[in-house]
Amino acid sequence: MAWGKKKGGRKEPLFGLPAALADLRLTAADRIPNAVEDKPKKSTKSTKSSAKRKSDDAGDEPPRERKAPAGRSGAKRRAKSGGFGLGRLVYWGAVLSLWGVIAVIGVVIYVGAHLPPIQSLEIPKRPPTIQIVGIDGSVLAQRGEMAGANIALKDLPPYLPKAFIAIEDRRFYSHFGIDPVGILRALVTNVMHRGVSQGGSTLSQQLAKNLFLTQERTMQRKLQEAELAIWLERKHSKDEILELYLNRVYFGSGAYGVEAAAQKYFGKSAKNVTIAEAAMLAGLVKSPSRLAPNRNPEGAEARAQIVLAAMADAKFITDAQAQASIGHPSYNVKPVGAGTINYVADWIGEVLDDLVGQIDESIKVETTIDPKLQGVAEAAIIDELAAKSVKFNVSQGALVAMTPDGAVRAMVGGRNYSESQYNRAVTARRQPGSSFKPFVYLTALEQGLTPDTMRQDAPIEVKGWKPENYTHEYFGAVTLTQALAMSLNTVAIRLGLEVGPKNVVRTAHRLGISSKLEPNASIALGTSEVSVVELVGAYAPFANGGFAVAPHVVTRIRTLSGKLLYMRQTDEHTQIIDPRMVGMMNTMMRETLISGTAKKAEIPGWPAAGKTGTSQDYRDAWFIGYTANLVTGVWLGNDDNSPTKKATGGGLPVEVWSRFMKTAHEGVPVANLPSSPGGWGLSNLAQAASQVSPPTAPAPAPAAVNNGGYRPPPPTRANVRPEPAAGLDGWLMDRLFGGNR
């Protein structure tokens, strides 16, 4: 019996599996969907109801499967695929942009974290300068950064600031501190030239670097420079920034600011520079050390022509003005000499800290230097070395001249400061040779001897050491005056051992030698090293009557506004040598210039005294000579301590000294050297004569002259030698090992 034939027909009951499957019907929702079919548009429940109704209507006919049109499905898939690609591009673009913004913000924060707080940033004060003036008030030198006075933008000729804008930052008045157009242009140019040939920094960036940052070439510094440039632009007007820039930028040769540069290179104020000079100043900024006109005039002029072309291109000047400036440059670079005054300036810089402490504002230092004498001293050293340095193998020299109270009037620390800044007058220490002997003789006088005391000039041996006289000759019994004038080494050694090397050292230190001295037998021949300035200072008491002297060059220090920071106090007149001994020493050392080793030294009409010195192997040649007006010392030698070609103290040093002193004493009233009050009596002569063995050949009796002067007779060449078994002569043995005096 078929199902569903009659509506009202009888139905047989079913049991088991057939009963369970009797009402089972499949619908479209029960089928596995095809990949191309759309998802059902209605819920499962509504689908089943619809299927049931259709099944009832269709009877036993199974339902048919619906298929979506193929064309519509393909178009839908293509639309979905295209939309997904564009959306993906937009999405990732937005993500990358966001991360880029975050990265930029992070870099800005990092760079800013390494800057001082912006709110605390202030335009720093100009670096302090040290203006050094001579005794006549003239400016001798400047130290520090040599910044000129600030000049307002309105006081400068209009073409001067425009020259900097034309060559450094054409868009200065239109950018906000950073010029993207300029950076892009510089980037393209550098890529085309495969190297850094053009920079993109604005004037604001350059000012920020000069004011707040170092000169290191790093990306962090460039970013800091950019941030600070933007800050400057917000805080200051364009004209204020330009004015600051012109007054702070470096122009080479130690000159900061347009005023200092104009004075340095053209000898005029920046207010008065020409168009050609303005172009040269603007051109220096690119490479101040390489293009400084006093070092590279050709390079400076070539760069200036580039600046002039840029000014004409920017319509800051006419083409005719540019051509006129190029064709007829008016550069008048000030000549640069040897500059030995800079040795004085360096010495002043070394003592300033002790005098006024740290300097935080510009100052004027008033000195004892006489510009005229400084020029004479410089010429004397340079000219003599130029003429005779090859002949005697002498490459360097130094000179110090001071008044008897220690005021330095001239100082030359070398033949050419630009080649060597080493100060041989103050810093160098060399063996003084026989110029140290006056301290030995003064010690002997203070122990009771006189200029007429006799001592033996004969070979001597001290613990295997056998010093000789310069001439290898010996004169037997001689007076101390003769021995000092002729610089007899054996007599000086005998005296040094007699009075004690330690006492000689004490005497030298008392008179002003500050260097360490070794108290040994050779101290009498000047084997311990000293500087020129301290040796000259130690001779000064002989010229001033026996008073202590402190060599000095600074008298007053003031701020530029006039505030007094330091004033040298008058030295206490401390007597360190008995006036009687001073007169004796002057008598003895005058003979050095009359008949001794410094016979070439002379100052017409002036009583003068001094002592020559030559160290071992002719390595150093000295002469320290003085009048009642000046004490001057000269040293000549080589920096590497190599021997000269027999240059002695009585040669080149005496010639330099004489040339300087003759000029220095022109027009100065003649004054006598201090003399011994009352002379030194016959009792001293008798005492001195009893202390020595009779000379091999009799010597004429000495004759005294007025004013403490003394002219001893020439010594006799007796060539006296001690007995072979004695080693040291009997007199020296007695004195060293228990003899009475």
Image: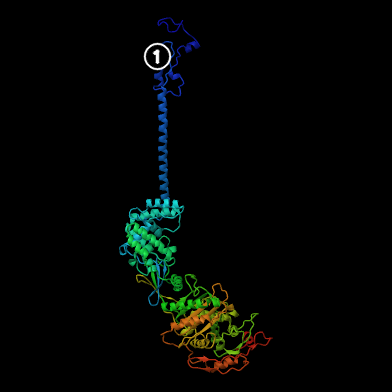
From this viewpoint, is residue 434 visible? yes
- 421 or 251: nearer the viewer: 251
Residue 712 x %, y %: 54, 91
Whether residue 416 sits left or right of residue 207 in the image: it is: right
Image quadrant where one finds the C terminus: bottom right
Q: How many marks?
A: 1
Whether residue 696 sits left or right of residue 207 in the image: it is: right
Q: In the rendered image, which quarter is residue 305 located in?
A: bottom left
- 189 or 625: nearer the viewer: 189
Kindly identify which residue carries mark 1. 54
- 3 or 566: nearer the viewer: 3
Tag 1: amino acid: Lys
**Which residue occupies 50% across, 12% down?**
17
- Residue 309 in the image: above or below residue 107: below
Dot 1: element: helix
Residue 518 x %, y %: 57, 77
Q: In the rendered image, which quarter is residue 290 located in?
A: bottom left
**Dot 1 surroundings within 10 Å: few (below 14), some, or many (20 or more)?**
some
